[in-house]
Image: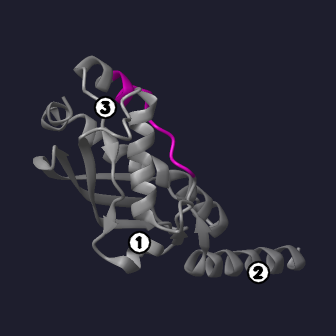
Amino acid sequence: MEKFWRIGALALVLAGALNGCAYVTAEPYSPNPDNAAVMIKADIGPAAVKAFTAANPSSDERLPGSLKMASPVDGSFASYLTTALREELMQAGKFGLGSTTVVTGTLLENEINANQFSRGNGHIKARFVVTRAEQTVYDQVKSGSRTWGAAPFSGIVAVEMARYRYPNIVQDLMNNLFGDPAFLEALK
């Protein structure tokens, strides 16, 4: 019985240590089919996507918070956001590489927290700019966030939950963007 308690205590200490210094790569983004339906219904035209930049280069490479996470897209979360938007447009058949309507933007905030004893959460905020024939027709800031339940006594599980939740945080941002009638109008 004493051996069981020692192993359990060691597992808790290890889990806590892993939670405090974990470094993982976020899961790839998957577009939301509902956004494709919204774009098709709104009858938007094709749009190109220009590379996003990061307002804070240090948070572009690794997310701040209790979990150190890297982007699977060129090691950059601004590139992750560029790819997410491109994939959303491609899913709807609305991505046009040579289009005079271009979407770009700036990653403003990007954070994820995975604590084994509390709820996990993440937040992202970005400025989206649409230009048509080099004239700005849309310039808005959008955000996305998610909260999820804790994984008691398991830092490894908390880390994995956050790793798999990151694309959902970005998807929430994309849902808010495609839910904005002014954005859809700018793409017509």
- Mark 1 Cα within 10 Å, few/some/many (few <14, many 20+)? many
Tag 3 secondary structure: loop
What residue is rendered at 40% in x and 50% in y? 170
Q: Amino acid at mark 1?
A: Asp
What residue is rendered at 38% in x and 35% in y? 95
Tag 2 secondary structure: helix
Q: CA distance from mark 3 to mark 1?
A: 28 Å
**76 with respect to 44 (left or right):** right
Residue at mark 1: 60
> From which residue to which does the magenta span run?
28-37
* Vertical side of 32 occupied by 147: above or below: below
Rendering coords of residue 109 (x, y %): 30, 67
Q: Earlier in the sequence, mark 3 or mark 2?
A: 2
**162 with respect to 187 (left or right):** right
**135 with respect to 57 (left or right):** left
Rendering coords of residue 79 (x, y %): 44, 60
Task: In this rendered view, identify the residue nearer to me: 150 or 168.
Answer: 168
Tag 1 secondary structure: helix
What residue is rendered at 31% in x and 51% in y? 144
Q: Earlier in the sequence, mark 1 or mark 2?
A: 2
What residue is rendered at 40% in x and 54% in y? 81
Rendering coords of residue 131 (x, y %): 17, 47
Task: In this rendered view, identify the residue nearer to me: 72 or 119.
Answer: 72
* Vertical side of 10 occupied by 112: above or below: above
